[in-house]
Amino acid sequence: MKKDSTLYVVLFTFVVCAAFVVVLAAANQVTKERVQDNAEYAAQVAVLKAFGLADSATAKDEVERLYSSSVTELPGEKKTYKASIDGATYFAIEQTGAGLWGNITAVVAADARGERLRGIEILSQIETPGLGGRIDESWFKEQFRGEKLGPNGITFTQDGTGKGDPDKENSRADGITGASRTSDFIGRIINAAVAELKKTGGAQ
Amino acid sequence: MKGQTAKIMKDGLWTNNPIFVQVLGICSTLAVTNNMKNTLIMVAGVTFATALGSSTLSAMKDWIPRKVRMIVQVLVLSFYVILIDIALRAYLPEVSKQLGPYVGLIITNCILMGRAEGFAAANKPWPSFVDGIANGLGYGVVLFAISIVREFLGFGSLLGFKVTPESFVPWTIMIMAPSAFFLVALALWGAKTWNAKADAKRKAAPPAGAKPAAAAATPAGAK
């Protein structure tokens, strides 16, 4: 068959595409369970971090033990969690919202009445690396730990130091330089999550 | 064979460096060089995908019809990139999370297509593999140099470790894309000037004898 004949071109393209796609599909199938386990584990770590029960250094079996002993998964459409820490009850929710390039999913934890944040953790994001992607850095996330929630929820300040806003009573956080939009999106996600948590907390 | 491998390595690293001479892969240079860790990950991904993609395409080249040449190149290159992505998600979930959008960015790197088209289409699999490694490393050396400057001035750290005193005011511009533009331009300017001088020296030297070869070896040696 001539290499430039239409039949050859069509057959060749078909066979090559099929071959490579089959290999990819097989690789995907083989690793599927592992990927799912990884995702589940990542979600558990995120919930524990949002509750302030674990940090990045916590070992894997410790995470599993802590999760099963102190976190309760609540029924409902959205993934919500409950934990009792030092006698107080806290709630957390997995909240997805728009980001600059794609969805941002975060776990947001707050007290039962939605008056104070317990903490936040980013589960997935595809913001610009080095700019919006810095929402996953600890200085950014730690500003929300124990932050008081005002009537307008969390707002961002433009004239921060770039090291995080240390004041826990002003309901304000330091935005990321060069990523004001991403900071705003995080604010929206937190405020939407808190609104949901207030409902959950009220019902419980 | 050994001489050829050495020549391909030298071409990729200096004489035909993807950034300095071919001016390929500039888009990712702007995106990832604001910190060193991202740069290293990107370089590893590009080197791996270019080397394997080029050698596979080279092995297939006698059967590829010219009309669909580029489609097949894109198919094979994206195949390797997706394979990297799957492997990372399954076995190194932490790295995979940090990489985020970078894995996808590898496909858009012009070096992959450039080397598939410019080298693998006319060479055997092994030299194509070496060429992929050499170009990946040549790209890496330049990116790494730029990322050192950008991370140091932009964050005051190197590889994530703080190396500047508290009083240091980070240059925010260095984190953003424009700074990569002028740093790449400065680096290009320096490399071109160096090469132009080496060329002039070679021309000035008498054509016969060992001298021209010695002059040609200077840039790589000095690097």
Image: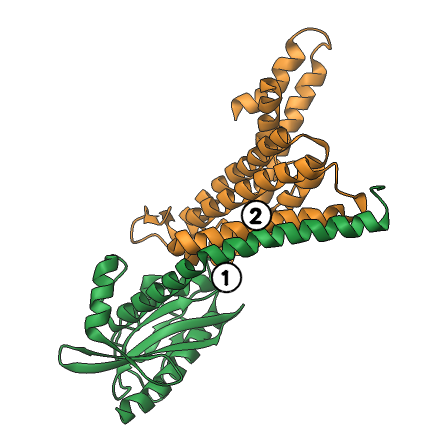
Chain colours: A green, B orange
Specify whether disc 2 shares its chain with disc 1.
Answer: no
Judged from this view, the residue extending furthest toward the top is: B209
Location of residue B11 with respect to B112 vertically, above or below:
above
Where's the C terminus of chain A, which quadrant? Answer: bottom left
Location of residue A111 with respect to B13 vertically, above or below:
below
Instruction: Please give the label number shown on residue A63.
Output: none
Residue A93 location (% of width, % of height)? 34, 79
Number of marks present in the image shown: 2
- In this orientation, does residue B68 appear? yes
The amino acid on which the numbered mark 1 sits, given as a three-letter code, is: Thr
Residue B9 location (% of width, % of height)? 57, 28
Q: Residues within 10 Å of mark 2 (few under 14, many from 20)?
A: many
Q: Secondary structure at mark 2?
A: helix
**Chain of the residue displaying label 2:** B
Where's the N terminus of chain A, which quadrant? Answer: top right
Residue located beneath label 1 in the image: A128
Residue located beneath label 2 in the image: B80
Residue placed at 24% from the left, 63% from the top?
A63
- In this orientation, does residue B170 appear? no
Q: Is residue A148 left or right of residue B111?
A: left
The amino acid on which the numbered mark 2 sits, given as a three-letter code, is: Tyr
Q: Is residue A49 left or right of residue B99?
A: left
Q: Is residue B21 left or right of residue A39?
A: right
Q: Nearer the viewer, mark 2 or mark 1?
A: 2
Q: Residues within 10 Å of mark 1 (few under 14, many from 20)?
A: some
